[in-house]
Image: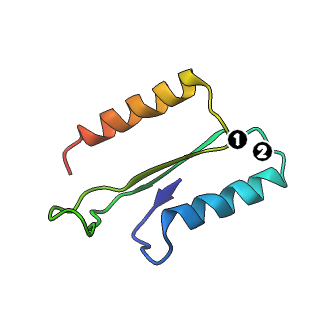
Amino acid sequence: MHNDGFVGIPPHIVSERIFGVLKRSSYTNTQCIVYLTNHLVKFADDDEPALLWWTQYNGQPPEDLMMFVNKLREGMVALPC
């Protein structure tokens, strides 16, 4: 999932809503949602804005899925903003 500049709803609310919709559809086996921004976000505990990457798993994810998502995140962090 991708946030294109909309900053009004926190990511945990968005991902909970998405999982709720997916559970009532043909996508009931969705195991993970990655929510990210294409713009820098200012966090209260950090002086430097950064891209937001929010991962939420549906239940206990398989280890290989967590490793895959972590590698994706590492690759994204390495990208210049």
Total numbered circles: 2
Query: What residue appears at the point 50 percent right and 74 percent down from the top-left corner?
Result: 9
Q: Is residue 4 left or right of residue 50?
A: right
Q: Position of residue 22 (x, y in %)?
A: 75, 52
- Kindly indicate the quadrant of the structure image that contains residue 16: bottom right
**Mark number displayed over residue 30:** 1
Cα–Cα gap, marks 2 and 1: 6 Å
Question: Quick one: which residue is furthest to the top in this view?
Answer: 64
Query: What residue appears at the point 75 percent right and 59 percent down from the top-left corner?
Result: 20
Element at badge 2? loop
- The answer to the question of whether label 2 and label 1 lie on touching residues, with beta carbons closer than 8 A, is yes
Q: Position of residue 4 (x, y in %)?
A: 43, 65
| Circle 2: residue type | Tyr
Q: Position of residue 37 (x, y in %)?
A: 39, 58
Element at badge 1? loop
Query: What residue appears at the point 60 percent right and 58 percent down from the top-left corner?
Result: 15
Badge 1 crowding class, 10 Å Cα cut-off, few under 14, some 14 to 19, many 20 or more, is: few
| Circle 1: residue type | Thr
Q: Is residue 71 above or below residue 42?
A: above
**Mark number displayed over residue 44:** none
Q: Is residue 53 left or right of residue 60?
A: left
Q: Is residue 12 above or below residue 60?
A: below
- Kindly indicate the quadrant of the structure image that contains residue 19: bottom right
Query: What residue appears at the point 44 percent right and 73 percent down from the top-left corner?
Result: 6
Q: Is residue 48 left or right of residue 36?
A: left
Give the camera-side residue of 78 and 48.
48
Q: Position of residue 63 (x, y in %)?
A: 56, 23
Give the residue pinned by disc 2: 27
